[in-house]
Image: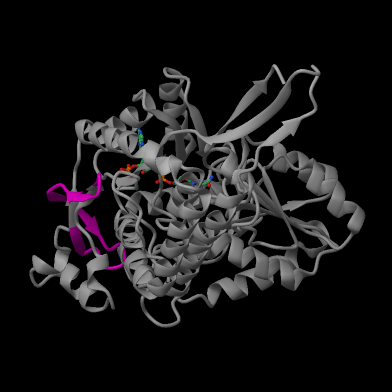
Amino acid sequence: MTPPVAARATQSAASSLQSRLKDPSLLRDRCYIDGAWVGTPEFAVNNPATGVELIKIPQLSADDATTAVEAAERAFPAWAKLTAKQRSNILRKWFDLIIANREDLALILTSEQGKPLAEALGEVDIGAAYVEFFAEEARRVYGETIPTQRPDARLLAIRQPIGVCGAITPWNFPNSMITRKVSPALAAGCTVVLKPANETPLSALALVALAEKAGVPKGVFNIITGDAPPIGKVLCEHPAVRFVGFTGSTEVGKILYRQASVGVKKLGLELGGNAPFVVFDDADIDAAVEGAIVSKYRNMGQTCVCANRLYAQDKIYDAFVTKLSKKVAEMKIGDGTEQGVTQGPLINMEAIEKVERHIADAVKGGAKIVTGGKRSSLGRSFFEPTVLSDVRPDALVSHEETFGPLAPVIRFKDEADVIAMCNASPFGLASYFYSRDIGRVWRVAEALESGMVGVNSGLITTEVAPFGGVKESGLGREGSRHGMDEYVEIKYVMMAGV
Ligand code: NAP
């Protein structure tokens, strides 16, 4: 094994981070292809809270991506041939190692991504929960027998691993977006080539280091970092790759969709959202405020399922805005590793500029800034968590995903109007609403055009439920037993001459 960074690190942010890890070997600066740590560190990964370079990672090329795909192709037959129990046991060991190293993984995650440490620990736990769930699910990839239409024949459908899978993941959940793809793939008997986001590759490299320790054979799980477009093209167009799983923006998802059409590849797309969060007159307002906080401000609003536009009904509008802004004003901004911090930095300055654009547009249309509204005095990409009232339904923020700590509250009068506003979007990932009227709960849950609906809850993600969107928010589902369907093909077998 190539030595981890420790052997080479100079007195730097990398060695300082390493000194805080119980297992310093989890901080890696090489890619992992065919069971070897490869590449030359040359591309900087920065800590968004300090602006300081943490480490450099390799910039691999399209040729390296091809090498990784070929390694995954060679590894596939033997991995697919293992029994489900053998694969399950290896995944279970990976899960145990992730849990045993959860503090280190969380610290690496916060250092490269910025979210508060408590949230990073939560992400590592849900990331591990996917591995645990699919370790169990590996043993339940059942087929079926089909009542025959011919007396001399018997019919069955078996489910087989699809083959080599490409995976491309974003920076906002650098741990769980990986395990949500890789663990069902490995459980089904597939092999994987993963390209994590350039901003946050360190969580991915730590995860593969633990997978190696757990006994995942060489070539089964490969990671490459580098320029995304050429690597993505290889993953979409190489004939050996049979499935590409992507989480990220709708814009990039559409590029991959086009590229994958060349070889008619199966695609899983978890794309952008524009989640409405509706509070009806009959809601428990305090519960709705709690839900809005967790849905809107988790990960500083950089969550694909986070509430993007909030609708509050006439009678409770003022009370909701007052209670929400009071809580938001109390949030502590700072480096995510500091005690009590609930709002870290945004990922970069473009993210800040987008939040500012949405605020300026809403204010131009008559909105009022109730709290926040500007960059934090901490500088860099810290932004004050913001609540806007009197936002017009046609404001820019109601059409575009902000991906920042901005809650624009729009007033509405009746149920039909708010459903129409919620559905007037090309996106359909998550929706939330608060109501205690059981009839309304059913009507609205059924009417909302989104893949997921939170009723009286602002937090819906769990490994046991199907995660995914409709319309331009994507294709397919991750997590739950449905998450396995992406990684298997159904083969029909007729046995005649019985
Ligand atoms: P992004 O720009 O689309 O990047 C996502 C990944 O795609 C990164 O690894 C990126 O690599 C790579 N990429 C960029 N251009 C590519 C290309 N031409 N070909 C192949 N890969 C390419 O998205 P992001 O800004 O990181 O993430 C935020 C978006 O993700 C938001 O829209 C959010 O809603 C969405 N998201 C959706 C879900 C979901 O489950 N539906 C979950 C989380 C996030 P580089 O980093 O190297 O550029």
Relative side of 122 to 15, left or right: right
Residue 407, above or below 362: below
Q: Is 37 inside the magenta-drawn segment?
A: yes
Quadrant for the C terminus, please: top right
Q: Is residue 56 left or right of residue 491?
A: left
- Is residue 386 visible from the viewing direction of this image? no
For image coordinates 65% across by 53% down, the residue present is 465
Give the magenta part as a residue range. 33-55
Q: Position of residue 392 (x, y in %)?
A: 65, 47
**Residue 258: percent from left, percent from top:** 44, 22
Residue situated in front as seen by the camera: 292 or 231: 231
Residue 396 screen position, x and y as percent: 55, 42
Name the spot of residue 247 as percent of width and height, x first.
47, 43
Residue shown at 42% from the left, 19% from the top? 263
Q: In the image shown, does 88 or 462 lie closer to the viewer?
A: 88
Does residue 205 appear anywhere in the picture? yes
Q: Residue at x 36, y 64 (%)?
A: 109
Is 66 covered by the magenta stretch?
A: no
Indicate the colouring scheme. one colour
How many discs appear?
0
